[in-house]
Image (spheres, helix red, strand yellow):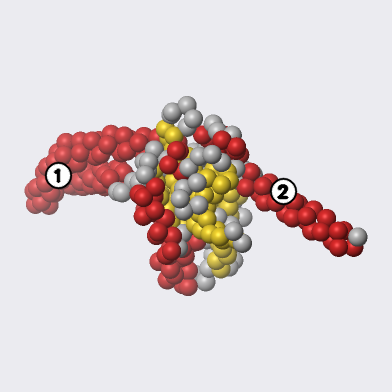
Amino acid sequence: MHFNDELIAANERLKASEERFRAVIDSAGDALYIHDFDGKILQTNKRAQQDLGYTEQEFKNMTVMDVDSDYPNVEDLRHLWAALKDGNQIAYGHHKRKDGSIFPIEVHLSTYSDENGTNIVAVVRNISERQKMEQELIRKNKELQNFVYIVSHNLRSPVASLQGLTSILNYSSNSDSTPEMSKAVKMIERCVNKLDDTLKDLNQSLSYQKNNSVIEEVEVRPLIESILELLNGDIVEHKAQIKLDIHLNCVGAVKAYLHNIIFNMVLNAINYRDYNKPLKIVIKAYSDSDNKIISVEDNGIGMELCNSTKDTIFQMYGRHSNRVGKGLGLYLSKIQAESMGAQITVESQLGKGSSFSLVFQNYPH
């Protein structure tokens, strides 16, 4: 009797463990497939069943080749699976639903071993929305590049000519003109030079769109650490205390854009420090149910902001302080954030500090 009781208890524990495992994989936001090295599907979660329209029982009578439209032959897949000996792999392809429709996927592959042997775990994400965003980004970039061309070639030449003429006038006015004439020429020269600077700034802001603008999964902590290394001289000089609160592994972004935005946010925290107290900067990265967020908080001079002025800080030359700077960095950051489908927000109190947040919406499945 005692042995039977132990056996019953062991079976109940095993059943409870299986139920917990099932609950975990069913709660995952991505589709999950466990299959063997012949491609036979052994287990799926609810997301996989929802994505493709098959029941769990139907999946158990299917193979990976039945749902993967890019690899109808198991031999082709075995070449991919063989690479798992060197560690986890990421692959891209297309899945085919029960109704015949096809959608793009990103697959994270790993192996799983138990007493029954070694199988493959495939975590599959529908990247349809991501690809739509990337295509829209490419379209916008092309439009902006055309505008860059117009600015560079149609406006730069007349401005250069004006600069040459003002130089001649300035030279002439030094010899035989009245003080009023000399003053007027100087004013014209300053205006033309300001126009030249403005065109250069506009070119710079738009030329960012010509960078590599492919959205990829960017590792957050290494990127932030590389930025702090670049700013190490300023950090040491101003004795800034940096705290990292990173709870986000990756974010879908254009790496160059993300680097520039965080760099600008940290540099602003340093530039707009309060001279009367030690500078403290907190860099956070986390996610909630709707968003992935990277923020930079400081205890600097802060700003008086209301709803009507929050947006002006992100406009070209929008400034709220007489400190060093042209007001271009946050404008460029806003352009880059929006081109990735993200947004920048700001909260600030005069004398207490500011907090800038870069907010990415989670991709819908």
Numbered badge on residue 44: none
> What residue is shown at x 25% (from left), y 39% (from top)?
145
Residue at the farthest right position? 1
> What residue is shown at x 53% (from left), y 68% (from top)?
240
- Residue type at mark 1 is Ala
Question: Measured from the top left, where is residue 223 in percent x and y?
Answer: 44, 60
Residue 119 in view of the camera: yes
**Of 159 and 249, which appears nearest the observer?**
249
Distance from the alpha carbon under mark 1 to that under mark 2 = 74 Å
Q: Earlier in the sequence, mark 1 or mark 2?
A: 2
Question: Measured from the top left, where is residue 98 in percent x and y?
Answer: 49, 30
Q: Say left or right for 177 vs 347.
A: left
Question: Measured from the top left, where is residue 36 in percent x and y?
Answer: 50, 52
**Of 354 and 75, which appears nearest the observer?**
75
**Of 246 and 234, which appears nearest the observer?**
246
Numbered badge on residue 160: 1
- Residue type at mark 2 is Glu
Q: Say left or right for 131 vs 308.
A: left
Question: Measured from the top left, where is residue 147 in percent x and y?
Answer: 25, 35
- Element assignment for label 1: helix
Sort mark 1 into few (<14), some (14-19) or many (20+) by Cα contacts within 10 Å.
some
> Which residue position is annotated with label 2?
19
**Of 138 and 336, which appears nearest the observer?**
138
